[in-house]
Image (cartoon, coloured by chain):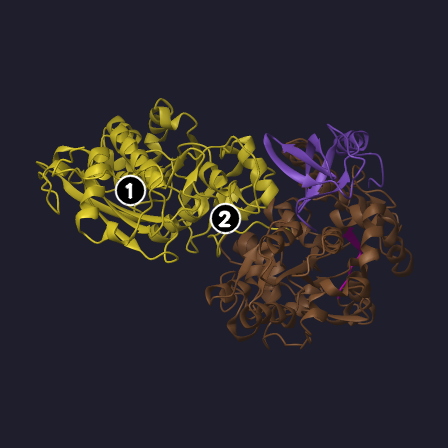
Amino acid sequence: MSIRNDYVRPIDFKLGRINMTHGAGGRTAAQLIDELFAPAFDNEYLRQGHDGALLPLPASGRLVMSTDGHVVSPLFFPGGDIGSLSVHGTINDVAMSGARPLYLAASFIIEEGFALADLKRIVESMAAAAREAGVPIVTGDTKVVQKGKGDGVFISTTGIGVAPVGLCIDGRQARSGDAILLSGSLGEHGVAVMSLRESLEFETTIESDSVALHTLVQAMLQALPDANALHVLRDPTRGGLATTLNEIAKQSQVGMLIREADIPVLPQVAAACELLGLDPLYVANEGKLIAICAPEVADRLLATMRSHPLGRDAQHIGTVQDDANGFVQMATRFGGRRVVDWLSGDQLPRIC
Amino acid sequence: MCLAIPARVVQLLPSYRAVVDIAGVRKEISIDLVSDAQLDDYVIVHVGYAIGKIDPGEAQRSLALFSELAGSEGVV
Amino acid sequence: MKYIDEFRDGERARHIAAKIAAEVRADVSYSFMEFCGGHTHAISRYGIADMLPANVRMIHGPGCPVCVLPIGRIDLAIRLALERGVMLCTYGDTMRVPASDGLSLINAKARGADVRMVYSASDALKLAEQHPGREVVFLAIGFETTTPPTALVLRDAMARAATNFSVLCCHVLTPAAITHILESAEVRHLGTLPIDGFIGPAHVSIVIGSQPYEHFAEKYRKPVVITGFEPLDVLQGILMLVRQVNSGRAVVENEFSRVVTSQGNVTAQALVSKVFELRESFEWRGLGEIPYSALKIRPAFAAWDAERKFNLRYVSVPDHQQCECGAILRGVKRPADCKLFGTVCTPERPMGSCMVSNEGSCAAHYSYGRFRDTAVVVS
């Protein structure tokens, strides 16, 4: 038997586990990059092989940057995993300023002992999500923490995008009279994740709605003769629609009135929420957006959303109004009224 | 005063357990307290236990009562 | 969802509301207490108050087992977790109840206590069997609806000889609480709290039946209508109370007839009396000591009684001085009457029991209704 001098035993992705050397920056760490991250995320910037990526500046516009940490548990859930979630989440954050996402950076904090098979699955899921969205992961980092000091893996992603000069889409722009549009049904991500939590365990075919929304946003912007008729874009993630609307109401110093009958919720999501005593208004979404726009363009914007695959179930759900107290009110199905408050604490399943 | 919802029994299991279905969501629960529950019965589920059963006839009667015109009792 | 959606139909709701409006007497004031936290929640969530005529007033009662759990009982649970290293299991509702020293179960968890939220009592027993080296304690709260599941778990723990499992029993009883309210000074002597009838508990009644309420109708001459939780049920229940008041009757009627019978769930009742017995007295947060209002574990199950096992002694801890929970739970004051409401006391930082659970009067009002307190209500 002859052994090549440059032979390096390949990483065992089937049975191997992460150990402290994978994060130490030495040979093992480099091998992990060479055999996992680089081939999965492969793009011209990554191939440069620098610590940081050298990126061309866009010809015009303003830069938008966003960052997010992902600590979802369980790591794998119906419709996605922490990897795809981290890609979609940051792309969406960048897209919510009306920007076109350009590049992503990904940083991994992995617990000692984490199965390499799981890491590979997550990384490949991220790569697929990034490819599908057309947004490359151009730089990254890996650290390993001692067993017991992490929850398997935490992923942090940062995104950079470019928005046209003069575009002003942010949480302070909502005005009295504006229309509130929602791109689709609520609660799927939260329900999908909760269905796997120990002690809750219910069977459902509900999948997380995790998806990159930037193409929907671009379609919406292009449909408007004046992009500044679109005042606010936001994705209702943690805390759900209720929390997001309250945030915007506070930032813009307005009130809102939404209609319960117009808010879409899938029957299974409604049922799961009933079972657990949760309110779909407060359950996390990862593939929906809220658009607040000038009333004159509402119909056109709604039509545009509905003609896009990610906005088929879009609805006009309410109106912004003057209110010194900043209440988000909801007209219930019975013509009654109630306040839709911020989420207090964590939504915990109720018995009462 | 407690969160409990009606769910349809779709599978009976040993040891007084059952699988129930609410609009496509399925959960395994105990039917220890409603041991005569049958397939397609609707039971009221509270914290993982069936505590009672719906009487479909009474449910229909209730709905009919709601829709009744005023003029039955005590109208001014 | 069958048996849910039909009972939330907006059109039928408006129809019943119209009947109520047509049948109330203009010169009469109707005050009904809904006992259950579930009804308080439903009324707020569906905006039912908006659909009632101005002379019909709903008073929120103390039927929220989380709200009436005294600080001292939570302290016992927290101490077991923090000082004795037990795995403390409880329902989600209990996690945020504020106890002594700025602690709650969720804060204790942040400090390193092993506090686990469970959806079902059986999950606690399962955890005990999965962790044979740990002591597992289940903090059991709730009215009569939630008591049978705890009884089942104790029966199973005994059958499976789960020696590392025990229950800290804080189960309370509905009729005792209703009596306490009806006997209170404001109702009986001062007459400052008019209660013309009760919207009776829905799910508690599935277990205990409609028969136990006949006592209130007879002795105190107050109508009781056992009512389901869906908005149509609540509106129909109110209509039935209005009709009884108008015709001077005071009987028990059953609106929730699709599940509640006169006898209730006999299997569940038998099981409960096998495992539990009455406590002579039990402190309710905001209401003080109420005789024969709560349950404790029978001697036969002593080995699974956390109070005996860990030699726990209950110490009463008073609420914040300015907390008006007691008066609010008795229906004498409203949330907005409390100086702490909405400022010092919010759902994030509850000072008293009424703010803790979504069903406490103050929490319900804060989350769903406080916009009505303000002068400006934009339509």
As drawn, A47 above or below C191: above
Query: Which residue is under mark 1?
Result: A90
From the viewer's side, name the closer residue of A252 and C122. Answer: C122
Q: Which chain is yellow?
A: A
Q: Which chain is brown?
A: C
**Crowding near pointer 2: few (<14 within 10 Å), some, many (20+)?**
many
Q: Residue at x 50, y 32 (%)?
A: A206
From the viewer's side, name the closer residue of C193 and C307. Answer: C307
Which residues, given as a range, are shown in magenta?
A: C193-199
Chain of the residue under label 2: A
Q: Quadrant of residue B55?
A: top right
From the viewer's side, name the closer residue of A87 and A309. Answer: A87
Query: Which residue is under mark 2?
Result: A340
First reached walking from the N terminus: tag 2 or tag 1: 1
As drawn, C364 above or below C312: above
Q: Colour of chain B?
A: purple
Amino acid type at circle 1 is: Thr
